[in-house]
Amino acid sequence: MSRPRVEPVRHLGRLALVTLGLNGVIGGGIFVLPAQVAALSGAASTIAYLLAGAVALGIGTSLAFLGARFETSGGPYAYAAAAFGPVAGFQVGWLFCLARLTAMANLLNGAALYLGALLPRLAEPGPRALLILAAAAIVLGVLVAGIRQTALAAEALAVAKVAPLLLLGVAGLWLVAPEHLRPAAVEPGSLLRSVLLLIYAFTGFETLTVPAEEARAPRRDIPIALGATLGIVCALYLLVHVAALGGLENLAAETAPLATLADRLAGSSGRLAMTLVATVSMAGCALASLVGASRMLYAMAAAGQIPRRLGALDPRRRTPAVAAVLTATIAAALAIFGGYAFLAAVSSGSRLLIYLACSLAALRGAPAGAVARAVPMVTAGAIVVLLFGLKPSEVLFGMIGVGVGLGLFFLARFGRRDTEGAEAT
């Protein structure tokens, strides 16, 4: 006798989707990347923020168009599969998992960087590894507990990160020296690389499209949540970067730039507070990454494209516990042994391929001759240009990840054939 199918709980309303989106975007990037982007582009980094924001808005528009047509979990995976077939859908779904996996690793890594800047002993290899493992365990525990607990945590974490960043950005404007904001000549390759890294900071909003089967009204609420998330993020990021670029003497040399800006505003207590905000922010984003990756594995397993055990729901809590444990474990290992900029670039490259597929899917589904076709078309072109900013080592790492995914795909396919053969006999 077969067991009854375990169904997800429809609990996520519009506000919960927005907070999931904000947690998916606002994580380590805004706390670490301003300095790295300033090192690449100087004062022209403000232009990089504007370009990255424009690309993010284009991607969000394409996803909103697609989200209004689907109620099944999977987000980009479901959109690509419907437009281009199951193999293309699998590739997009697995790239999504790779992107969220490297993003979670980077968030754990970034939290260790920030705490290490405050307490140097935590930057040593042993304490840093323990810190990463502890953070991964806490995030995993919240997710496995259930979607209601995850939603409550996401809402609290969203408030805990957005409010202090808004306060820092507004207060930091009083420190801005106008000469720091005057852009000088910059190499096109440096500007391209800056935008590529910022894609990591601006994106992650696609996570809110993945748990559609846990949303109350996904076709109505997901497009609205995407628009609200992107509007808040673009305004907040630009505000904070202008404050940091204009208020710090040498932004490019800072390890924890926003903590330094807070120190200038409120002394050591400001630095401590911003370090804690950064840690909370990265924890919230790591939670969103784990939600996205585990729900994507659930959607792919339900479709029989990877071994079903990887995405199975826990009968009592109705969460994909096996997928969550696997993702968190690999992310913690990558965080311990990987570098921040490398992981950010790999995650950005994986996301760009996902967004390219979604833009093409939106283009294919748009009415003939409609003005709406221009947005996904221009967005797809911008994504192709940005992909040239990847380094060979980052491309190789991504190809290895895709290869592992294809191995799982064929393993599941052969498993289905064996099962069907056994049932036939």
Image: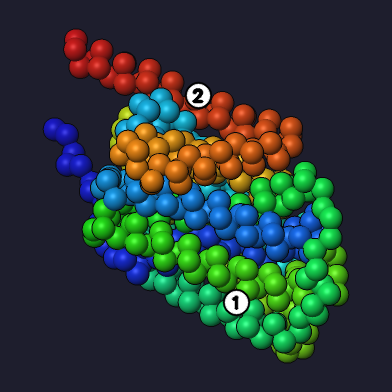
- List x then y, in percent, for residue 52: 61, 54
Identify the residue shown where x is 53% and y is 53%.
56
* SS class, disc 2: helix
The percent position of residue 332, horizontal first and vertical second, equals: 61, 51
Rendering quarter of residue 179 = bottom right
Q: Looking at the image, which residue sits at the far left?
A: 1
Dot placed on the residue nearer the N-terminal end, 2 or 1: 1
Amino acid carrying label 2: it is Gly
Residue 407 image label: 2
Query: Mark 2 Cα within 10 Å, few/some/many (few <14, many 20+)?
Result: few
Tell me if mark 1 has few (under 14), some (14-19) or many (20+) residues whose alpha carbon lies within 10 angstroms of its own.
many
Which residue corresponds to the image point at 66% horizontal and 86% vertical from the top-left? 171
Give the x, y percent position of residue 304: 33, 29
Closest to the camera, between mark 2 and mark 1, is 1
Asked whether, in this view, residue 198 is left or right of residue 215, the answer is: right
Specify the farthest residue to the top: 425
Task: Find disc 1 in the rendering and name its residue.
Answer: 165
Q: Quick one: quadrant of the N terminus?
A: top left
Question: For this view, does 62 lie left or right of residue 267?
Answer: left
Q: Residue at x 48, y 66 (%)?
A: 231
